[in-house]
Each structure stands twice: as structure tokens, then as C-alpha cells.
Image: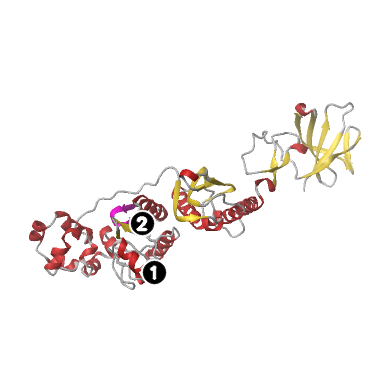
Amino acid sequence: MLDDERVVALTPAAARQGVQPGMRRGGVAAIAPGVLMLERDPAAEQAALDAAAQAVLHFTPRVEQAVGEHSLVLDIGASLALFGGPRNLGRQALARVRALGLRSRLGMAPTPAGARLLACRPGRRVRRRVLRLPALSPLLDTLPCPLLPAAGPYLDWLDNIGCHTLGDLRRLPRAGLQRRCSPALLQALDAAHGRASEGWRDFVPPAHFLDRCELSEHVDRSDAVRHPMDHLSARLCAWLDERQLAATRLVFGLEHERGRHARPPTSLELALAEPAWLPQHLDGPLRERLARTALPAPVIAVSLDVRDLAARPDRNAALFPDPAAIATDHGRLLDLLRARLGAEGVAQAAARADHRPEVANTWTAGPPASSGRAPPPPSVEPPCWLLSPPQLLDVRQDRPVHGSPLRLVHGPERIESGWWDRSWTLRDYFVAEDDRAVRYWIYRERDADPARWFLHGMFG
């Protein structure tokens, strides 16, 4: 990565080819012509830092961004027991940041400045975690002076006087050091050792999620777009996790060439039957949706916009399967089938706002949508087993008969409906019981003389 035509960051592969920080563009092109050189993008860096901050809000509500240092500070004093101690919490935090495609190092200390310095400590197998303040100072004393940002303007002078570590810096006379350097240097050094307080500004995530990812090159295959879409999905899930929300409808935008050959973006909408808040909830539908999408032109950027949100359903650990979890799995299967077959290729049972039992259910296709206003529920829940068509019953001494005379135990539940489709229905529904205590759902027609009785359903 270049800033002002000089290398400020590089990959290990570029380093193996001889590229070093501070080299000019021409020098890099001469020794490693195959290396891809990108200009520094402060907006993209801030977006990545925001995404990382949202991801670690899962562990504590107190997160601060150190923008100039590209670091995050977490106050985890109240979270250690909840997440299994410092080692487990650190592993989980690193895993969440790495899921965003970001490389990170972790430092842990009793002071925010000390934790930042330990995270920057060079080397692979070095100690970066200290939990007690007396053990922090000896470890900080071994760190080189360039790790302290406030020492940056004075590094040449400090090197000339033989001051190479923070321990050397701390042993210098404070009065002389304050005269020759900025007071901010002593303030930063004292803050790292816990001798001075530090200001704290909590990170506040955005109220609405809308993110975008620029691609380094033109992509003309739908499967190659999957990688940036996964990054955006991970950022979305971190944002949802912080707000304890779930997404029910989201739209990916695939942006194409601008200017003379401009084309409108390609939209990929995911309408989910079940609220989603984890990457695995989106993985299957997104993979199937991409497999059915033909790109009309190369893609240069990907965006993600969340259109509908819902409260995250509660889940409790239980010995036996949770019926709500079973229903959620059914919804995930419907999302996967819609993504594979298309919204119109999957039909499911749905309720209709009609009091007549034989027309109160239907099959619907298309994306999941909220149903219309349903009629008020009956005083008695109808049985699941309905007869089609209803069976006419014999009548003896004004009592309906089904094997034996039936005794009415509940009712009537009156239905007057269907005038708009020329199927005017006037019925009184009852729950009836025979001599063996078997219950039936029957109704009496009110528009016939003499009145007729019908068996419409059976209870289990």
C-alpha cells in the first residue's frame, strides 16, 4: 500500500520479494514488477476499523477507537467471568475480527495505553498479556521507543543520546525531558504505567446498516463476488449482534462500470422466512442465489443494504428439542429452496382472512410477506382433521347421529360469511360427543328448512 508514493504497508509475499516500508513506487516496480500497488484509502481504513469495533461490542459495551494507531481498546473488566477468562475472551475476540478478513494482534494490560503497546510488541512468541499492574512496568521497559506514538517526533534525538527503550526513556530526568520534548510524551508514558488517567470515548455504531466494498479489480464471475459479499455479511452480523436484532430482508448491490459504459447495478434481494443474525444463516441462501445469477457486466464494487429488521428470537437451552428451533429450521429450509428454485418455485401453506374453514387455508408462492388481517380466533380451536366435503348426518328426534346420537358439549360458534363470492354460508358450529366420548366438530345449516347437520372435522 502506498501513501504519498511510498510504501506504508505490505504483505509477507511482497516482503519476500524485497519490498520494504518507505520504498518509492519506482523502486518497487523495479525489483518486484508483479506486485500489486494500491493507494491508501483512509475511508476504507475507517470502515474496516468501524466493522472491527462493532464485532467486539459483543464482549463489552465499552470500546474505544484509536484511529491514528488503527487499534481498538476494550474495557473487559466486567466480562472476564462471562467469557471464560482472559485467554478464552482474547481468542474469541481475535476470531471475530479475523472473520472480517482483518489481521490483528492482541494485547492485554491493566491500562489502555499499556495494552496498545503490548499489542504492538514485535516478535512472534512474546508475552503480550499482563493482568496485574506491578508486572506491567518491567515488560513495558523492554519495548522500543518507536512503539510510543508520542515519541515519534523525537526518535532521532533519543537515538543519538542512547535512549532506545521505554525503560531508558523512563529513567531520563523528567524535568529535562519535559523541557526538550512535548508534555504529551510524559503524559503518554505515565498513562501506560498507570500513573495518569486517560480519557475515554465510547464507540457508537451507526443507526442504519449500509456498507460498501470496492474491488481491487474487475470481476466477471458470480462465484468470485462471493468473497466480498461474505465480508459484508460478517459486518452486518456484527452490527445486528450489537443491537440484538435480526434481518428479514436485505439487498446486495453489484455495481458495474461507470462513465461511458455505465450500467445500472445488479440487485440480489434475500427475503428470509426466518430472521437471520449469524453468517451461517445467510450462507446457504446467498450461495444458491449467486449460482442462479448471470452477471451482465464485470463488477467493480459490492454494497449491502438492510431493508427490514426484526427482534431477535430468544433461545433457551433445554433437554428436549425446542419447537421454536424446529420451526426456525423449517424457515431456513424454505429460504434455501427459494434461493435455489426462485421465489415463485416454492409454495407453502398460508392462512387466509376468512371464517369459513374450507377456504381459510391456501397455498402461496413468492417471497415471504406478512399476511392480511386474520379474523378473530374462534372460542374453540377447530380440529386439524377436516372432511372434504363435509358429511351429512342423520337426525333422530332432533339430534344428529354418527354411530350413536351425539351430545352437544360446546357451541354454537356462528359463521355468516361468503356473500362476496356467491357462497353465502350460514352455519352454527358445535363440539359434539358420542357414547364412547369421541369428539366431533359438526355444524347446523341455518338457511335450510328443516335444518341439516354436517360432520366437518374430528378431534384426535
| Mark number displayed over residue 285 | none
Identified by mark 1, the residue type is: Ala
Residue highlighted by disc 1: 13
Magenta residue span: 63-78
Whether 453 is among the magenta residues is no
Q: CA distance from mark 2 to mark 1?
A: 40 Å
Whether 77 is among the magenta residues is yes
Q: Badge 1 local density, few (<14 within 10 Å), some, or many (20+)? A: few
How many numbered discs?
2
Q: Quadrant of the N terminus?
A: bottom left
Who's the residue at 22% across and 54% down the image? 197
Whether residue 346 is visible here, answered yes or no, is no
Look at the picture and state if 17 lies above or below 434.
below
- Residue 460 percent location from the top left of the image: 77, 48
Mark 2 touching mark 1, by CB under 8 A? no
Provide the secondary structure element on which disc 1 rests: helix
Who's the residue at 45% across and 45% down the image? 210
- Residue 372 percent location from the top left of the image: 64, 35
Residue sitting nearer the eye, 351 or 206: 206
Residue 437 lies left or right of residue 253; in this view the side is: right
- Residue 319 percent location from the top left of the image: 59, 60
Residue highlighted by disc 2: 78
Look at the picture and state if 18 lies above or below 82.
below
